[in-house]
Image: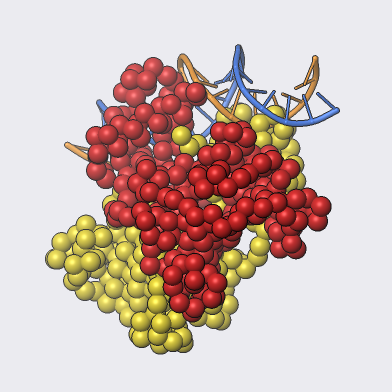
Chain colours: A yellow, B red, C blue, D orange
Amino acid sequence: MLKYQEIAEKIEAKIHKENLTQGTRLPNLSQLIKDYEVSKSTIVKALTILESRGVIYQVQGSGIFVRRRKRQGYINFLENQGFTADLDEFQLTSKVLDVSLIAPNEEVMRNLNCQPDDQVYHVKRVRYITGQTLCIEESFYKQSIVTYLNEAIVADSIFHYLNQALGIRIGFSDKYLSVGKLQKEAATYLSLKSGDPALFVEELFYLTSGEPFDFSKTTYHYEHSQFFLQSNSIHLS
Amino acid sequence: MLKYQEIAEKIEAKIHKENLTQGTRLPNLSQLIKDYEVSKSTIVKALTILESRGVIYQVQGSGIFVRRRKRQGYINFLENQGFTADLDEFQLTSKVLDVSLIAPNEEVMRNLNCQPDDQVYHVKRVRYITGQTLCIEESFYKQSIVTYLNEAIVADSIFHYLNQALGIRIGFSDKYLSVGKLQKEAATYLSLKSGDPALFVEELFYLTSGEPFDFSKTTYHYEHSQFFLQSNSIHLS
DNA sequence: GAGTGGTCTAGACCACCCT
DNA sequence: GGGTGGTCTAGACCACTCG
């Protein structure tokens, strides 16, 4: 395990364990350097990670402070799949509607940059959060990368399987969101009415190598989905 | 101007100017070190920034590559206010409905951590994107920080004014999103019908010092708002 | 195995906050 | 002015990719 990663985890764990509130000041840099017996740059890197994840904020000349979201019950929109997933907070379950190996249609080929003869796994699920219908999700995985899937795997966390069993590491993803009215089929699965509001999210997942391997379309139940999202001004031009 | 910031900007400018496509390989580290005459760490920092902004991705042992979003016409959900704003792409205008100095209500006090006698500027606007109604926005600014606002300022970019005229720098923000049905008043402003779908976003902006100073509630027109959002797995536990 | 990015260090110096 | 975070350097060594 990398030093800066380990330190970031320890600091985050400490914040959660001691349940520190927004604005609580953490030990200063020199103290952290002593505590963890590493160089300044390593601490700085660990802190940068925590800052970009919204766990802390740093104020030049002043100190390092805990950052907390104000509201509970919102799903972290950036970490709700593939990545760190704060699912500890929520109970996620799935009902599998379909798992099959198919030829990609035009839309899938366009998004995954693939050819008609590249097979893809088609997965369709209804997902539940703490017992309530959260969303209906339809995903397409390149079979050349995701070599095998079945119903049991898909009923559980697919990304956990990809990582643990297949050694697939996600590099990054693009999300596209829009809002609209539910069509009849989706409405049925979500126990809502045609024309009810819905959040539509299309997402493309890439390997660390930059190759897209998963294209996914999700329709969220408007009454059971609330998201939160933290931004930083680290960087910018 | 900081070296790493300047380098990040130059690299990004080059990518845009030469209109490089996804997967195009950039010069390697040693070349960049020579080109910009700085140390390795400085280049690495510049690249980390570009990576976190979704401009490039780096593959260990292989190279540095251009990252591009696949689709046009989507608003960058993380950079659409306060921050870098890729508004070059879109024409944003506003119609001001109200600018006034008021006493905060309970909801505003809770979000801005303030007292009944802390005055706040109330700003209500309809915003248009390339001529179409984009959203209706209601914001509350702590007067102790945002000392002055008027209709002319508010008709333009408020954040540009905060930064340039008042020297206010935003540190970070929290966004809360949900989807639901339009109420009559908002529907009227958006030229939609009651019960039509809408995206609701509540956002809290903080100074670099960690103090919240702006609480904002936005209702988006579902037919004219599409967002995109890039994630990385930089970091994570 | 050559090439490329990633980690880590020690230390100098800068910029900002606060009292 | 003392304390705290931020920038930048030079260089050693590690880890991954690809032919």
Residue at image location 30% in from the left, 37% down from the top? B16
Q: Quadrant of residue B191?
A: bottom left
Residue at image location 78% in from the left, 50% down from the top? B118
Q: Residue B52 or B112: which is nearer the viewer?
A: B112
Q: Is A222 placed left or right of B123 in the picture?
A: left
Q: Is B24 placed left or right of B209 in the picture?
A: left
Asked if one can make out residue A233 in the rendered structure from this viewpoint, the answer is no
> Quick check: A91 above or below B26?
below
Residue at image location 66% in from the left, 62% down from the top? A71
> Quick check: A106 above or below B37?
below
Q: Residue C18 or A181: which is nearer the viewer?
A: A181
Q: Is B221 placed left or right of B163 in the picture?
A: left
Find residue A202 and report its horizontal and vertical position in percent: 36, 64
Total labels: the figure holds 0
Q: Quadrant of residue A218?
A: bottom left
Find residue B131 and report its horizontal and vertical position in percent: 37, 56
Find residue A225 and report its horizontal and vertical position in percent: 53, 72
Asked if one can make out residue B133 in the rendered structure from this viewpoint, the answer is yes
Residue at image location 32% in from the left, 55% down from the top? B73
Q: Residue C12 or B190: which is nearer the viewer?
A: B190
> Quick check: A101 above or below B225?
below
Find residue A5 and report its horizontal and vertical position in percent: 55, 43
Q: Residue A54 or B151: which is nearer the viewer?
A: B151
Q: Quadrant of residue D15?
A: top left
